[in-house]
């Protein structure tokens, strides 16, 4: 974890520092090596939140796009169950960043627990998805294209939006659940990371798009390049 408590103040890990976990209030120690990002770890080597995964630089880079006071916020359900959300905005939207492989059961459990949430997953670790994106972007020939994708049993048909960080030129691919007849059910749409984060930081919430066939511009090779704000899927409040 990035933050721990010392005298009720959230602090980051520094060499030889000590503090307590904000979730279970047990002792944590600073891990400040050269191979991994500096972080806090439970002294007993057992995490109090079984949904928590080892943090990488990819996690840290995404978290740092949002205000510090939104990062690693404890979300408590009515029954007392609690988990540490990667990011929770001032409007209550939870953003979870997922890099390691998890089961469909855990994906659904976390989605149902937070309810008002979106996923951002690192697909650069899955070569098939990465190559598919590269090929798709290079093969676009029509002025108007409906982007669609089958995400299979693990990430498909969720009740919350999922965004793929494909690691190419700062693009994200979004899949949005259908809520009305004219919404695109998991239609693929592209957008720039900087627009995505700026919109979320300003509004603190997510609003699903009304999907329309995208239009873009052509580069010098004749390939269609989607616009930065392809579907105006985030409303700046």
Image (cartoon, rainbow, N blue to C red):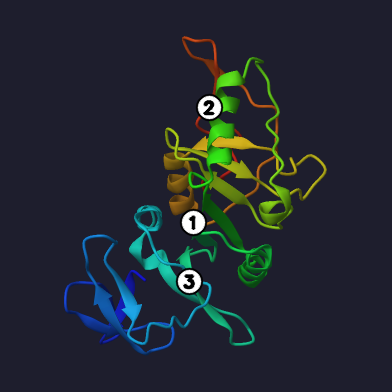
- Residue that mark 2 sits on: 227
Q: Is 10 above or below relative to 181? A: below
Tell me if residue 31 comes above or below residue 56 in the rendering. Answer: below
Place of residue 223 in the rendered image (x, y in percent of width and height, measured from the top left): 55, 15
Q: Which residue is mark 3?
A: 52
Residue beneath the point at 49% across and 47% down = 125
**Does residue 172 sit above or below 83 in this rendering?**
above
Label 2, secondary structure: give it. Answer: loop
**Position of the N terminus by quadrant:** bottom left
Among the two numbered marks 3 and 2 on one chain, the one whose residue lies closer to the N terminus = 3
Structural distance between the alpha carbons of marks 1 and 3: 11 Å
Q: Residue at x 59, y 87 (%)?
A: 80
Q: Which residue is more in the foreground, 182 or 42?
A: 42
Disc with the residue nearer the chain's start (1 vs 2): 1
Residue at (75% x, 42% y) in the render: 183
Residue 102, image quadrant: bottom right
Give x and y (percent) for residue 225: 53, 22
Which residue is labeled 1 in the image? 99
CA distance separating discs 1 and 2: 27 Å
Around disc 1, counting alpha carbons within 10 Å, would you say few (fewer than 14), some (14 to 19), or many (20 or more)? some
Q: Residue at x 67, y 47 (%)?
A: 176
């Amino acid at each position: 974890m990035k933050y721990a408590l010392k005298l009720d103040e959230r602090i980051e890990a520094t060499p030889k520092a000590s503090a307590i976990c904000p979730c279970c209030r047990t002792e944590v120690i600073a891990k400040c090596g050269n191979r991994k990002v500096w972080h806090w770890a439970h002294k007993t080597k057992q995490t109090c939140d079984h949904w928590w995964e080892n943090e990488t630089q990819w996690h840290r880079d995404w978290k740092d796009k949002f205000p510090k006071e939104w990062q690693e916020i404890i979300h408590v359900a009515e029954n007392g169950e609690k988990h540490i959300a990667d990011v929770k905005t001032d409007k209550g939207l939870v953003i979870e960043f997922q890099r390691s492989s998890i089961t469909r059961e855990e994906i659904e459990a976390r989605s149902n627990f937070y309810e008002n949430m979106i996923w951002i997953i690192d697909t650069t670790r899955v070569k098939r998805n990465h190559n598919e994106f590269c090929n798709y972007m290079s093969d676009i020939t029509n002025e108007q294209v409906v982007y669609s994708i089958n995400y299979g049993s693990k990430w498909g048909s969720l009740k919350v939006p999922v965004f793929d960080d494909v690691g190419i030129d700062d693009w994200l691919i979004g899949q949005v659940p259908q809520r009305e007849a004219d919404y695109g059910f998991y239609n693929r749409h592209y957008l720039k990371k900087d627009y995505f984060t700026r919109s979320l930081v300003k509004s603190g919430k997510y609003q699903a798009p009304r999907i329309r066939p995208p239009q873009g511009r052509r580069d010098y090779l004749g390939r269609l390049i989607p616009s930065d704000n392809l579907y105006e899927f985030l409303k700046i409040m």
